[in-house]
Amino acid sequence: MMRIWATIKIALRALRRNKLRTLLTMLGMIIGVAAVIAMVSIGNGAKSQIEAQIASMGQNVILVFSGSFTRGGARSGWGGAGTLTIDDAEAIQREIPGVVAVSPEIRTRAQIAAGNQNWNTQILGEAPEYFDIRQWPVVEGAAFTGQDVRSANKVAVIGKTIADQLFPGEESLGQCIRVKNVPFIILGMLLPKGLSVQGQDQDDLIIIPYTSAMKRVQRVTTVGSIVVQAAKPTLLSPVQQQIIELLRQHHHITPGKDDDFTVRNQQEIAEMATAQSKTMTVLLGAIAGVSLVVGGIGIMNIMLVSVTERTREIGIRMAIGARGRDILLQFLIEAVTLSVIGGIIGIGAGVGSSKALAAQTGWPTLIPSEWLIYAFCFSGVVGVFFGFYPARKASRLDPIEALRYE
Amino acid sequence: MNSVIALEDIHKVYHTGGVDVHAVRGVSSAIQTGEFVAVMGASGSGKSTLMNLIGCLDRATRGRYLLDGTDVSQLNRDELADIRNRKIGFVFQGFNLLARTSALENVELPMLYLHRHLRGREQRAHALRALETVGLADRADHHPNQLSGGQQQRVAIARALVNQPALLLADEPTGNLDSQTSIEIMGVFQKLNGQGITLIMVTHELDIARYTRRNLIMRDGLIVSDVPVTSRLDAETELRRLHDAHQAVQLTV
């Protein structure tokens, strides 16, 4: 053990002797590790933001879309065919255990107007449960009720953007807005959510009872989709399965025929959304990894030069009793010291640059602490990996030849 | 008497480029404790090869070599390294000190590879004592480039002594030194020999060989002459004579 400590001291002294060379060699590692840390922090920041957004969809949510239809070769996309009905939604609520809440949904865009102002916005027809499912409380006034749904009342809950655009500087509650010329009374305003990751204004919408949307706005008898909430995350898959079975039965789909609807659960949606950021992280990580390898090759290169330069020293050490292992260890420790110190500086630089980036661009960055440990360990591994060959070359020199080397 | 070195029919054959070179062809000899031997011979006579064999830097192709009672002919690389560390001290023609490393640290170097590791303080004490032996204790912190050739060679001798080896091997130790410094180094060797240290020295300078007690002459891989030195030179006397001659020159000018 004492011998290893003495060897470390020799290695450190050798590195101190060639300060500029040591620094330049380390630079490869520093840049590599800093790049890895910065990339991972950017990727993680993006991922956590997307996850937060998915969570804002509500908890344990399953979405049922009606199927698409094809007309003249053009396919309508999910929800186009109008195969889902209020009966389907009620059946899901009634017959499937583990379902907490159900909200039939009708989505459309329309021009809305109030006084002399007008605005094009998203209109959602929902059940009152929708506010609970999405954990999106009404902060001013109140939400509509089951009674409003049963009577298809002309009432609405609006997002903050609507209030700002249609009633600038005025109280919006109790005011009347016209949706496709049908007047609705504003009952409440939703908690402002701000912009989404993609930059969409999440507060630019109005929510009305789904019955009102069907009868008074869209004049349809079917719903576009059904939002279902399961009691527990573990119930997502079984409930999803049961919904499929139930709807096939309801829609009289014989075995072998395709579903005329689609069911997605929140997990799948989250996976799709994070897949993109994951790809990004992997890509950036790969680029950063390449720079780490380049840094390692730099270390290997300089160690090979160092072994050649110090052939005579190696010969002297061998003549006075150093074993091959002692020489191997000396050069290996030198390489690992280079890479680990480079790694530590790189971690600092990576953390610093990701913080600077966050401050400059406003990108969310998040440095997972385990990655700091990975980076540290990995830089050590790089040192061992790329230092081994030169060190072994040194340890296998013939002492007589090495002593004669000029 | 105790044999430090016993060589029995030592052969060394190199295979280079498909040609066998028979560098040493059956050397048998014994060197006792406290001897001071000069090995001489023209280049290509096999004296360097023999020194490498005696120094355990290389292994004989055939024959038996007992060093301080241990048969070292069959040892592997690591075992030979340990033998070199504990039993042999090397002094080279080119000094072979580590540059940018103080004299003291150079002398401490062999202790680094000792099996029984010494504490830093002990290492320092041993190294200082070795430097004292060669009269350089006051230069312990100097780096090789701050020392004269003779001083560097003394540091190298101190390094060779520090592990208290059974044998000191010097390969052309005066090859890079002027005649006065050469005599000074011979003085150091004679003093060490007087303390009972066994010395073997390769040289091609006849007058340097006259400071030793026994001369081996090699030719074509064999020892052709093995004679005790009759009119042995004393380094101190020679130095004084040189000094007087020098002063005489100055007086006449």
Image (tube, rainbow, N blue to C red):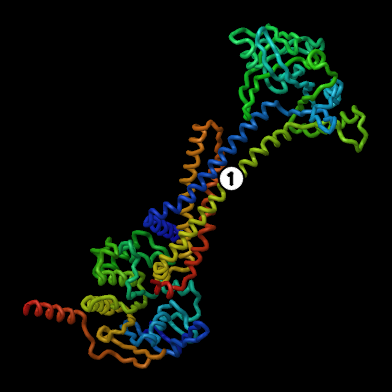
Q: Is residue A37 visible?
A: yes
Name the outermost residue toward the bottom. B224
Could you tell whether A203 is left or right of A180 in the image? left
Vertical comparison of B49 with A62: above or below? below
Vertical comparison of A328 with B175: above or below? above
Could you tell whether A266 is left or right of B104 in the image? right
Where the C terminus of chain B falls, by quadrant? bottom left
The subunit carrying tag 1 is A
Question: Which residue: 53% across, 50% down?
Answer: A291
Question: Which of the 4 image quarters holds residue A192?
Answer: top right
Q: Which residue is mark 1?
A: A285
B3 or A217: nearer the viewer: A217
Tag 1: residue type? Gly
Could you tell whether A2 is left or right of A45 in the image? left
Q: Residues within 10 Å of mark 1 (few under 14, many from 20)?
A: some
Where the N terminus of chain B falls, by quadrant? bottom left
